[in-house]
Image (cartoon, helix red, strand yellow):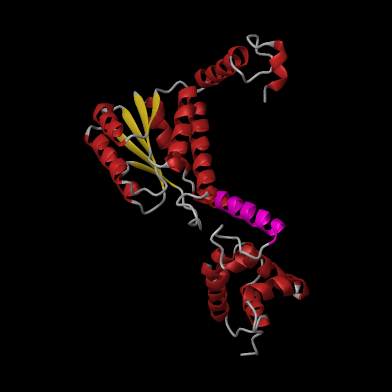
Amino acid sequence: MTEFIPSSLLRQLRDRQADLPEAQRRVVQLILSDPRTAVAATVEQLAQQAGVSMPTIVRTARSFGHDSVREFMVSLAQDLAVTGSHLHRSVLNEDTGPDVASKIIHAAVSSLTDLGRRIDPDLVDRVVDKLAAASRIDCYSVGAASSFMASELQSRLFRLGRPAHAIFDAHQQLVSANTLGPNGVAFVVSHVGRMPYTLEAARFAQSRGATVVALTQPGTPLAALADLRLEVSVPPDAVMRVGTEAYLAHLVMIEILTVRLAQKMGPVATQGLQQFRQLLEQHGFDSAEFVGMNPDERHHVD
């Protein structure tokens, strides 16, 4: 092996990328954009994502003093263990402001792109069919992140005229599960997918004949028990149990569901949404021209 420069590999990658051949520079840029994902990727995956050949990955490793890609990745992993940040999985403590912005945006876009590749349109439509036919839809969740998403789902369903409720209290979830029945849907939103009380409510709803739909990660107990599972897979966050990428992926999935539901409902949904918007403009504070507002206050409306 050629002599290894006694400084961090990440620093070398950053400092020397401009001097590399174009193909190797693309490899280095890919690694620096998300080093934690890169260290777990195969040579084939790296080559595909960087748009280069697999031998180029090998040549890149050798350019930084390593005989093999495996050796290069071990060095990168060791470097991450020392210099890694607890702020965000893609961000290093020494990153500049532009680096932080670029990496966080890149990570979010990558997660949504991956969601687009994994989504099953047939499964989405099966869930939509259940939501369209349900006599009642109760959205269960626990925790700040999942409760926010369950509330958003309930709000969108309610605006489409569907009988939907968001229930966050464990006792009330059991009461709901007991009364849903065969035409009801228990829609459980939990990225973690392991909350005991919510799992108990989901099982109870099933025992009463209701359909359990889960929006969760693959491989969770919730995914295992659900009748229909919408799985969202994102890399773990460095700080939060449910990070920004999970928020975005779940919200996009909710929007896909509700837009498909509106399409299925046809004019009933579109007319209802138009009427709802007109109602807000006439009687709410969505418009600076709200007739019930003091004219002197109108310029203060956001």
Magenta stretch: dominant secondary structure? helix
Q: At which x and y percent is residue 98?
A: 71, 56
At horizontal 68% and vertical 66% (from top left) the residue drawn is 29
* 45 relative to 131, above or below: below
Query: Looking at the image, how many numbered discs can be counted on the residues?
Result: 0
* 14 relative to 302, above or below: below
At horizontal 52% and vertical 71% (from top left) the residue drawn is 81
Q: Is residue 177 left or right of residue 11?
A: left
Name the foreground residue: 270 vs 191: 191
Q: At which x and y percent is residue 105?
A: 64, 51
139 falls in the magenta region: no
Q: At which x and y percent is residue 188?
A: 37, 39
Q: Is residue 117 left or right of residue 163?
A: right
Q: Quadrant of the N terminus?
A: bottom right
Q: Residue furthest front?
A: 296
Q: Is residue 209 left or right of residue 269?
A: left
Q: For residue 96, what is the image quadrant? A: bottom right
Name the foreground residue: 85 vs 89: 85
Q: Quadrant of the C terminus?
A: top right
Q: For residue 146, what is the image quadrant? A: top left
Q: At which x and y percent is residue 2?
A: 65, 90
* 54 relative to 127, above or below: below
107 falls in the magenta region: yes
At horizontal 51% and vertical 27% (from top left) the residue drawn is 262
Q: Residue furthest right?
A: 19
Name the foreground residue: 127 vs 109: 109
Q: Residue furthest top?
A: 291
Magenta-colored span: 96-112
